Image (spheres, rainbow, N blue to C red):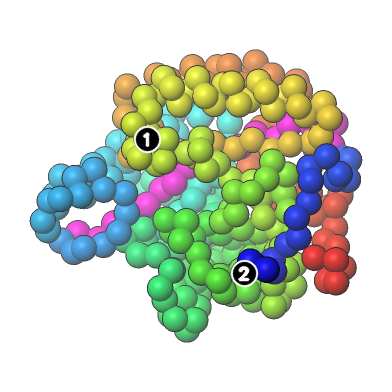
Amino acid sequence: MLPTHDRFPYSAIANRPNFSWPEGRRLAFYVALCVESFAYNCSGLGTPLTPNHGHPNKFNWSWREYGNRVGGWRLIDLFDEFRLPLTVLLNSACYEHCPELIAVHRGRGDEIVGHGRTNSENQNGLSLEEERRLIQEATEAFRRHEGGSPRGWMSPGANATIQTEDLLAKEGYRYTLDWPIDDQPVWLTTDAGPLLSVPYAHELNDIPMVIFHDATAQQFADSSIDNFDELLCQSKQQPLVFGITIHNFIFGQPFRLKQLRRLLEHVTKHRDTVWFTTSGAIADHFASVVPPPEPAML
């Protein structure tokens, strides 16, 4: 037998409960926007544009900082234009670094998802107590600034540990974006009760697709449109979720904004049939129509 995680069993999408999203919609669409802050003059993590430069790597830090100073504001304008909500994956360090930007997201009613303290660190390799402290410190910052706890969590750099789900559930989180395993939400088991996994973009994510695999913005938009059209067709058989993930320092670049606008123009032609929403609203609706199975069945 291969080692396993024991978080959820195998489940074929053809054999699931049938339900609909609000107003009878069959496809839910959301955009996850990563808003991150990075350490300066140290070997912190995060996506590198110039990985061989020594520190202080001003070029690499500046590339990522562009998103908070410029790109993020342009993305807000674009999503205002299309009247679309955002799911903001937020480093808690941004409350000190770029509070004006976060205030505008808050004013829009965007959902704040816990994304750790900073993407200059990740959870993998931490002890249980170190990871517990990371999650607690980030969560306390979210509570203090937002007036309540975030419902969802996405680990910095997608580097969760074997114990992350247990710690999240104990801290009161209701769902995670760390498992890109499905086109529907999936219930996970933890030491502190059920935790929902909401579908998260792994391939239609600008870090792997644009930065790691050298796709152009046009290719990203083309692939996203193809994925949207195909899932819209498949959603006649099963209720589905489609999310894309972008970073403000990547798709906030002007030449990529043009292609993102083309993508949004395409998908919003289907406002009458698609639910344009946030990952938290998806989690809430799914939990209301498909409750977690009994522990022995997970």
Q: Residue at x 45, y 26 (%)?
A: 220
Q: Position of residue 18 (x, y in %)?
A: 89, 40
Image-quadrant location for residue 25:
top right
28 is within the stretch colored magenta:
yes
Q: Is residue 136 above or below residue 292?
A: below
Element on which disc 2 rests = loop
Any part of residue 39 in sight: yes
Relative horizontal placement of residue 281, taking residue 168 as reference (left or right): right
Q: Amino acid at mark 1?
A: His
Q: Pick the residue in front: 136 or 194.
A: 194
Find the magenta span and give its range.
Answer: 20-40
Q: Residue at x 50, y 64 (%)?
A: 160
Q: Pick the residue in front: 83 or 46.
A: 46
Mark 2–mark 1 Cα distance, whole angstroms, equals 30 Å
Q: Earlier in the sequence, mark 2 or mark 1?
A: 2
Relative horizontal placement of residue 37, taking residue 108 as reference (left or right): left
Q: Is residue 281 above or below residue 94?
A: above
Residue under circle 1? 213
Q: Amino acid at mark 2?
A: Pro
Q: Residue at x 15, y 61 (%)?
A: 41
Residue furthest to the front in view is 1
Q: Position of residue 73 (x, y in %)?
A: 37, 35
Residue furthest to the bottom in view is 129
113 is within the stretch colored magenta:
no
Look at the image and tell me in which quarter the N terminus lies: bottom right
Residue under circle 2? 3
Look at the image and tell me in which quarter the C terminus lies: bottom right
Q: Are marks 2 and 1 in contact (CB under 8 Å)?
A: no
